[in-house]
Image (tube, rainbow, N blue to C red):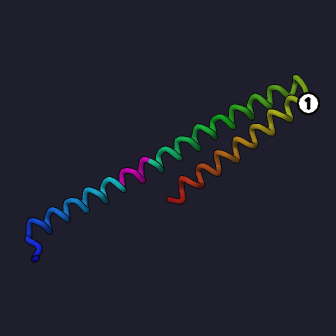
Amino acid sequence: MAQTKADRQAAAKKGAATRQRNKVKTQSQSRGKRAASTRQGRAAADQAKRAAGSAVGGVKKAAKSAGGAAKSAGKSAASRAGARKK
């Protein structure tokens, strides 16, 4: 059976709506990843500040804090790289 003009128009509208939904979904995911990497980066900076301050308190405590800050910084960088891929 032949497809009418109305059928073609309805199919085109449905396709356009799907493409728009997918676009918005991708943008939202990207924003969420960027927000997470920013949050992680700020936490890493905060930990680094605490590590510098705790150096006075003890070498072991300062080393532990510095290690945690480095770990957080790496996590932030990985998140940002993942957000940039898409």
Residue 52: percent from the left, percent from the top? 80, 31
State whether the magenta stretch is mostly helix, strand or loop.
helix
- Name the residue: 87% across, 24% down: 56
Magenta range is 23-28
| Residue furthest bottom in the image | 2
Q: Is residue 27 left or right of residue 34?
A: left
64 part of magenta stretch: no
Q: Position of residue 6 (x, y in %)?
A: 9, 65
Q: Is residue 60 above or below residue 72?
A: above
Q: Residue at x 36, y 56 (%)?
A: 22
User: Please, is residue 58 above or below residue 80 in the view?
Assistant: above
Residue under the image location 19 percent in, 60 percent down? 13
Q: Residues within 10 Å of mark 1 (few under 14, many from 20)?
A: few
Residue situated in front as seen by the camera: 80 or 15: 15
Which amino acid, mark 1? Answer: Val
Q: Give coordinates of residue 66: x percent, y percent.
A: 80, 37
Q: Describe the element under mark 1 as helix, strand or loop.
A: helix
Specify whether 63 is left or right of 49.
Answer: right
Residue at the limit of the structure toward the right, as seen here: 59
The residue to which callout 1 is attached is 59
Q: Is residue 63 left or right of residue 78?
A: right
- Residue 33 placement (x, y as % from top left): 53, 46
Q: Residue furthest front?
A: 1
Residue at 19%, 64% (x, y): give it: 11
The residue nearer to you, when weighing 73 against 21, is 21
Locate the N terminus and report the quarter of the image it occupies: bottom left
Task: Name the image quarter holding residue 47.
Answer: top right
